[in-house]
Image (cartoon, grey):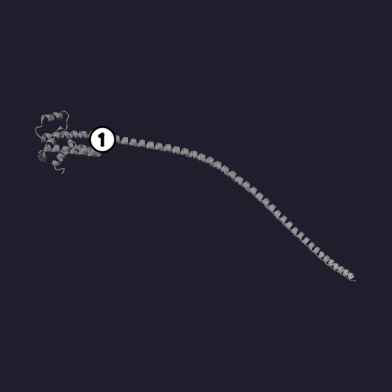
Amino acid sequence: RSSGDSLRQVAREFEETAGKTTAQVTTTADQLKIGIRDLAASSDRISAQVRGAGESLRRQSQELAEATEHSSAQLESVFEMLRQKSNDLGLTGERLSHHAGSLVQSFSRQADDLVKASREAEQRAQELEQQRNRVSVENFLQGAAYLVEKLQSLSVDISRIFQSGIDDKTWREFHSGDQSVFLRKILKNLDRNQISAIRTRYEDDGQFRDYVNRYLAEFETLLAKAREADRADVLTGTFTSAEVGKLYLVLSRALGRLE
């Protein structure tokens, strides 16, 4: 009896356990079905998302490829334009360099020609100035020669009147061409007393006074012409230091014209 009870007890427990297991299996199966459905739905969503993402990625990739291709075409066009411009600039630079070199050479030649012409003009101007000075001095000397002859002639008259007893030697020298001999004789023999006597003779002797006045006037005319000529300082110094000038200074000082 106890064995039967025990068996029945085991059977009941087995049945209960089997029922529980069946229920659990059923529940688990239901849960699994639900999980599978959820997984399928999730898988569909994921697949859809993946397909959407892939489509977007393909679209973006295509757009990127198209943009890249377009950009590449633009860059190639730009590079081609730059190469062309570079070639043009190179040619232009060569032409400009050539023209610049030609201009520099042309300006250099013109500058050399101008410098040469300037030097030639300066040299010509100096030659003309020297020629003008020579002509001016020559013209003056031609006119001055006549005045000096008159002064020398007047000195003869002054010496003849002022100094009696002129020796024959002096006359011979004069007639042989030494026109200044009387000037030297007057200047050589003049002393303080004779210089003082000039004023007295000038005041008392009309003929002597006339010769002296003419001599002074002629020499002053000579000086005036010398001052108007080129190299006036040289000419005036030359005539003043000559015998005709020395006699002029003696007569002028004796008559009180020079202090």
Left or right of 122 in this view: 29: right
Residue at 63% in and 47% down? 72
Residue 217: image location, x then y, percent: 18, 39
Q: Which amino acid, by three-letter code, is at mark 1?
A: Val
How busy is the neighbourhood of tag 1: few (under 14 within 10 Å), some, or many (20 plus)? some
Query: Residue visible at 75% across and 58% down?
Result: 43
Front in this rendered view, residue 123 or 30:
30
Task: Locate residue 136, reporting x and y percent.
Answer: 27, 35
Q: Nearer the viewer, residue 200 or 238?
A: 238
Q: Nearer the viewer, residue 10 or 37?
A: 10
Residue 41, image x and y in percent? 76, 60
Q: Is residue 60 left or right of residue 8?
A: left
Count the labels in the image: 1
Quadrant in which the C terminus is drawn: top left
Q: Residue furthest right?
A: 1
Write down the residue under mark 1. Answer: 137
| SS class, disc 1 | helix
**Quadrant assignment, res 209:** top left
Residue at the far front: name it: 2
**Screen quadrant of the N terminus:** bottom right
Residue 4 in which image quadrant: bottom right
In the displayed structure, would residue 18 be above or below residue 217? below
Residue 97 visible within the image: yes
Q: Position of residue 207 (x, y in %)?
A: 12, 36
Q: Is residue 202 visible?
A: no
| Residue drawn at the location 29% of the way across and 35% of the way down | 130
Specify the quadrant of the image occupied by residue 222: top left
Q: Is residue 139 left or right of residue 209?
A: right
